[in-house]
Amino acid sequence: MSKKCEVCGKTPLKAAKLTFSHKQIVKRQSPNLQEIRVNVNGQTKKMTVCTSCLRAGKVQKAV
């Protein structure tokens, strides 16, 4: 099972690069996921969160 952001649900993407000779190279682009401790309803919980959710302030880091 692939990891995903528990806040926004971001998952890895497949991206195809097409060369001049039309050889297709499929690469996997993963979101920047961090496993951090988060305050949820007054309790501390470990969550996997992407950095864009962290910067946007969608989660509160535990101290």
Image (cartoon, rainbow, N blue to C red):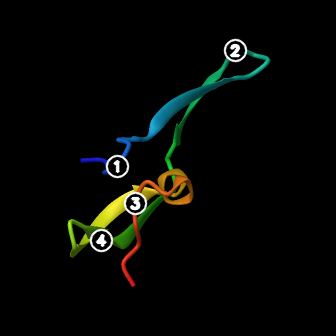
Q: Position of residue 54 (x, y in %)?
A: 50, 59
Q: Which residue is mark 2?
A: 22
Q: Amino acid at mark 2?
A: His
Hey, what amino acid is under mark 1?
Answer: Val
Number of the front mark, 1 or 3: 3
Q: Is residue 27 left or right of residue 4?
A: right
Looking at the rendered image, the disc whose residue lies closer to the viewer, 2 or 4, is: 4
Q: Are marks 1 and 3 in contact (CB under 8 Å)?
A: yes
Give the number of the disc on residue 59: 3
22 left or right of 32 in image: right
- Amino acid type, callout 3: Val
What x and y, as percent, mark residue 37? Answer: 33, 74
In contact (CB < 8 Å): disc 1 and disc 4: no
Q: Is residue 25 left or right of residue 49?
A: right
Residue annotated with mark 1: 7
Pick whichever of labels 1 and 4 is earlier in the sequence: 1
Nearer to me, 26 or 59: 59
